[in-house]
Image (cartoon, rainbow, N blue to C red):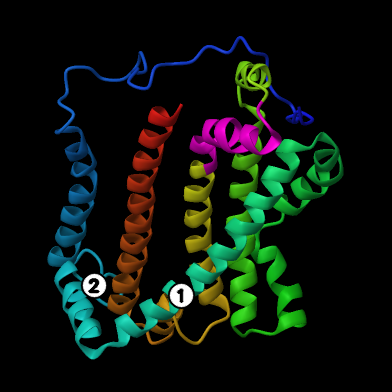
Amino acid sequence: MSTPIALAGSPPAAVARRGAGAQAPWAPRGLSRRLRPLLAWPLPLAVLAVWWLAAHQGWVAPQVLPSPAAVARTFVELLESGELWANLVVSFWRVVWGFAAGAGVGLALGVAMGLSPTVKDYLHPIFKAFAQIPVLGWLPLLMLLVGIDEALKIILIAKAAAVPVAINTLQGIQNVPTRYIELARVFRFSRWQLLTKVVFPAALAPIWNGIRYGLTHAWLALVVVELLASSEGLGFMIVYGRQLFQLDVVMAAVVVVGAVGFALDRLLALAEARLLRWRRVGL
């Protein structure tokens, strides 16, 4: 029988598990599951109504706060001219490459620290210090080292994505119930079987949460970097519109940034639901 894996910081076996369909005691009752998504609409609709009223009544100058109709017209014009699509594609590929690199590094670090107490003792203190430095803190140094080309943006986006992925992967592996490990030892699982059939399936939910948070952080870092050091992309559109005092362009770009970020998170949430359904069946 192969040497069993010693998970770093595994909790005791007697860990109570909440059922998958359990509801928090403070959650509101009596509301249909189909109606719950509608709860997210009143607040943005109220904000839109106040925005329209402020612009229509002239409470704020149109040069400072353009009306929703003006922003919508600008959005359509940017779409028809191709300017919005061109900048969106640039931003999209930047976040794809940066997130892929950062998620890969974060997964590798999280798995290494989670499976080996020795690796965790060596790397965890340094990693925690590294994680405390925000993206903007690295910007001046990296501008001197790699310039302001694409490498700068990819590195900073990767850093933003790697931290939450590594942290959630480490916590997910550490929180694998010890009884799972003991049962695998009883059945004489090999090291590979223990990893693929026990550890990774049991840690899948927190790992995927880390990937979702990593993508969110990567998207935010992308916009920040493009605001400060870019000549194309959605962040550049915001800066360009501000410099020309075209706030309709600024607000149209901001709406696109929010919509794309929300769409990416929803896609990962749907993928997570499918993965966790597979995990429940597999376990």
Point 59% across, 73% down: residue:
154
For disc 1, the neighbor class at 10 Å (few under 14, some 14 to 19, many from 20) is few
- Find residue 202 and report its image quarter: top right
Q: Position of residue 178 (x, y in %)?
A: 65, 19
Please tell me whether residue 200 belongs to the stretch shown in magenta: yes
**As drawn, is 124 to the left or to the right of 239?**
right
- Taking the view exactly as shown, the residue that stands out farthest to the front is 1
Q: Are marks 1 and 2 in contact (CB under 8 Å)?
A: no
Q: Position of residue 275 (x, y in %)?
A: 40, 41
- Find residue 72 and report its image quarter: bottom left
Point 74% across, 31% down: residue:
5
Q: In the rendered structure, find residue 210 and report the number of the disc placed on it.
A: none
Relative to 236, does residue 110 appear above or below in the rendering? above
Q: CA distance from mark 1 to mark 2?
A: 31 Å
Depth order, front residue of 175/156 = 175
Amino acid at dot 1 = Trp
**As drawn, is 263 to the left or to the right of 2?**
left
Q: Which residue is mark 1?
A: 93
Please tell me whether residue 73 belongs to the stretch shown in magenta: no
Camera-near label (1 vs 2) is 1
Amino acid at dot 2 = Pro
Total marks in image:
2
Q: Position of residue 96 (x, y in %)?
A: 48, 68
Q: In the rendered structure, find residue 66 and report the number of the disc placed on it.
A: 2
Write down the region rendered in magenta: 189-207
Indicate which disc, 1 or 2, sits on the residue closer to the N terminus. Answer: 2
